[in-house]
Amino acid sequence: METNARYLTIGCFTLAAIVACLGFVFWLNHSGGMSNQQMVRVRFGNQVSGLQPGAAVLFDGMRVGSVANLAVDPQDPRRVLADLAIAAGTPVRQDTRAGIASQGLMGTVAVSLEGGDPAALPLTAQGGERPMLLADPTAGRSLTQSAQDTLGHVDAILADNSDSLKSTMDSLKVFSGALAKNSGRVDAVMAGLAQMAGGGPAKVPPPVYDLATPQLTPFGAIPAGQIVIGTPTAVVALQTQRLLTRSPDGEISPAGTMQWSDALPTLLQQKVSQSFDDAKLVTTLVAPSDFGKDDRQLQLDLRRFDILTGPDRTAEVVFSAKLLSGDGHVVATRLFEGKAPSADADEAASVKALNAAFGTAIVDLGAWVAAPISKDAAGRPPAL
């Protein structure tokens, strides 16, 4: 009994909901917004491609209703009648213009109404028929027809300028042929422009070589005091990190892509100091504020550090040396040379030969600096 009562309650509730929905629809059509409409008929004198029932009706671009019905005019099959359901109060007048509009580039087709003169009479029904507007004769032209007309104009322009177009195409053909024949040069030019603009492939860093530190033979007796090694002097051509070659007629040129670990004068100073320190000779690269009586200063002038080209490739290192006493007087001078054959022209062979030549010169320099300085009867170095 309780189950039957529950089913009866559910059935009554469902029936009440259906009745409420029907009542809402009835109110909407007769008392709500849908009942506040007016019907207007538009007669199109051409085809209305794409227009369908339910399409929007726009008044000055604003939607005011929809197309209720479409039919062919029974009195004239060349015309189409469109019944529009638009909002009541829409100011449709006798001079209102009707047409076809497209909503967006690829949008749906809609009926467009454009407002008329405010002084014009409102559109009214005549003879018991619905108020009727006569659309623009070109309003029914489809977008396809417009596109065909546009293509026709383009075709006419191409036909009128066929000779000029043919000449232009011939010129392009000749130009492309010239580019094809000179593609290698074009690639080189483009690569150069890319490098100027900071683009292109990353530049491979050059190999860097360090100059070997010559090993000096231990000295029997080491002079007292310290040796101040000043910054060597050199001509501009030798103030570089590049590997240098010298032709038999004296032309100096950089060779290869390698670099020394520092400029050649600085390398000479550093390697001399390291060799002397390893041989227990006390050195400094900065002049002391007060020279002792046993201190000496070594001044170097780099003159050659290159590969002599020709049938017999030879590495040559040449520099002059001045030895100054603690009071600043020059006590000895000498020119040092080192040579070593360079069998091959590659960078590794050249570096090996220059290391050998440099070692020969530095060994002679060490023996010269470590030798005691002869003095006169007054205990002073002899004047040069």
Image (cartoon, rainbow, N blue to C red):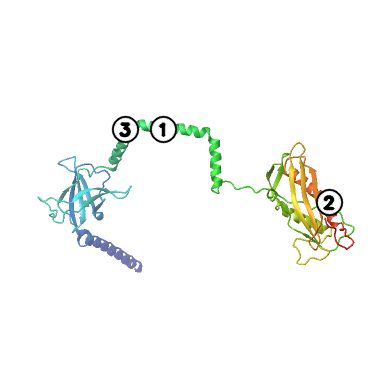
Placement of 246 over or under 302, stated as above or below = above
Residue 97 image position (x, y, % from top left): 19, 49
Q: Earlier in the sequence, mark 2 or mark 3?
A: 3
Kindly identify which residue carries mark 1: 169
Of the pair 53 and 168, the residue shown nearer to us = 168
Residue drawn at x 80%, y 49% is 336
Q: Residues within 10 Å of mark 1 (few under 14, many from 20)?
A: few
Label 2 vs label 3: CA separation? 93 Å
Q: How many marks?
A: 3
- Which amino acid type corresponds to the residue marked 1 in the rendered image? Met
Residue drawn at x 32%, y 68% is 5
Kindly identify which residue carries mark 2: 364
Label 1 vs label 2: CA separation? 79 Å
Disc sitting over residue 160 in the figure: 3
Residue 133 image position (x, y, % from top left): 16, 49
Kind of element beneath mark 1: helix
Q: Residues within 10 Å of mark 3 (few under 14, many from 20)?
A: few
Q: Earlier in the sequence, mark 1 or mark 2?
A: 1
- Which amino acid type corresponds to the residue marked 3 in the rendered image? Asp
Q: Residues within 10 Å of mark 2 (few under 14, many from 20)?
A: some
Which callout, 2 or 3, points to the residue nearer the camera?
2
Residue 197 vs residue 304: left or right? left
Q: Earlier in the sequence, mark 1 or mark 3?
A: 3
Of the pair 4 and 194, the residue shown nearer to us = 194
Kind of element beneath mark 3: helix
Residue 77 image position (x, y, % from top left): 18, 40
- Which amino acid type corresponds to the residue marked 2 in the rendered image? Asp
Residue 141 image position (x, y, % from top left): 25, 42
Q: Residue furthest left?
A: 127
